[in-house]
Image: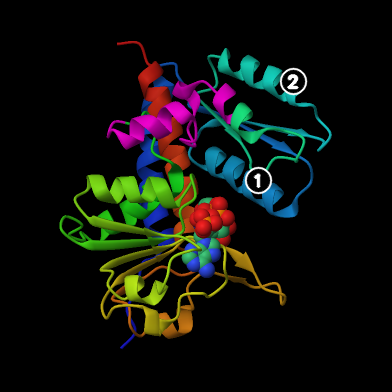
Amino acid sequence: MPGQLLDGNLLSRKIRAEIAARAAIVTAKGVRPGLAVIVLGDNPASQVYVRNKVKACEDVGFHSVLERYSAELGEEELLARIATLNADPSIHGILVQLPLPAHIASERVLEAIAPQKDVDGFHIANAGALMVGHPEFKPCTPYGCMKMLESIEYPVRGARAVIVGASNIVGKPMAMLLLQAGATVTICNSKTRDLAHHTKDADILVVATGKPKMISGDMIKNGAVVIDVGINRLPDGKLCGDVDFDTAKYIAGWITPVPGGVGPMTITMLLMNTLEAAEKAVKP
Ligand code: NDP
């Protein structure tokens, strides 16, 4: 029998309704949550992501600003824009859509965002704070994955969690959040020997590699929760995850679809972080 679907759209709708209600409360107190999104160049995937983020803001009653620049924008000009937004009291969250063009040092740009407005949670100060257990903002994708586990009341404490992928924006912060929730965590990367040995041991398996369908059903433990972060476009134009959904769904106890799993949750947690930044700005 196929596992149960962890539906990110459904859960997002619930959480976004709560966000909209809280946004109305802070707005009535004179602080309308505001998110600024900066995108450089015309990468079609980035354009879709930023449009979705801005639309999501509008739907929950936030103020949003979308700043589009050519791929040739200089690093100093971009940093100057960020400095202006850092000082703008109507903006509570600033997001720079990645990837940035090669002539721009992404780390320099991410670290120019004021940590109090770093709603993506990528600033080195937030990464460090996450490591010691009290981040200003949790990175949106791992935060969304934790919310999914919470939604099914999964007993994370004491569970074996395996994360395939060790990036700074997904794999590593995911490991920290699971560890802090009491899981025993293994992080795998492209050099891991006998990957299936690790994945088959996982009660919670999170996959974020960018390698289409690389985790098949025979690499999964019976009844595991499988969270597929990957978003890959196949030559036929369809989207798929890093997990082979068609074989994995018969083995997993719970599984996220792609699309409609982690993707919408990432945007939802971006809204949550922005809301919380605005709530902190309300004068008592
Ligand atoms: P990165 O390319 O930054 O990192 C990929 C990680 O996967 C690396 O740690 C790499 O190992 C590891 N890896 C690659 N191949 C293998 C392999 N064969 N076996 C084990 N590990 C492997 O990717 P991101 O973390 O940025 O993104 C991963 C995926 O998640 C992408 O598909 C991306 O589009 C998607 N994504 C989805 C989001 C959402 O909202 N749903 C948000 C962010 C990303 P090594 O360290 O050795 O190189």
Please tell me which residue lies in front, 259 or 217: 217
Of the two numbered discs 2 and 1 on the same chain, state the one appearing first in sequence: 1
Q: Secondary structure at mark 1?
A: helix
Q: Would residue 56 be seen by someone viewing this image from the given angle?
A: yes
Image quarter in which the N terminus is found? bottom left
Depicted 231 relative to depicted 62: above or below: below
| Beta carbon at label 1 within 8 Å of ligand 1 | no
The magenta stretch is: 110-134
Numbered disc in front, either 2 or 1: 2
- Identify the residue shown where x is 48% and y is 63%: 191
Residue located 33% across and 57% down the image: 148
- In the rendered image, residue 97, in percent from the top left (x then y), is placed at 63, 40
Label 1 sits on what residue type? Arg
Packing grade of label 1 (10 A; few <14, some 14-19, many >=20) is some
Q: Residue at x 49, y 50 (%)?
A: 167
Q: Quadrant of residue 281?
A: top left
Q: Which mark is residue 51?
A: 1
Res 76 label: 2
Determine if the C-beta at disc 2 is less than 8 A from ligand 1: no
In front here: 57 or 233?
A: 233
Q: Quadrant of residue 129?
A: top left
Total marks drawn? 2
The image quadrant that residue 57 belongs to is top right
Give the Cα distance between marks 2 and 1: 25 Å
Quadrant that contains the C terminus: top left
Residue 27 percent location from the top left of the image: 43, 23
Examine the rendering and report whether any part of residue 259 can be seen: no
Q: Is residue 194 left or right of residue 37?
A: left
Whether 126 is among the magenta residues is: yes
Check disc 2 and report its element: helix, strand or loop. helix
Which is nearer the eye, 143 or 79? 79
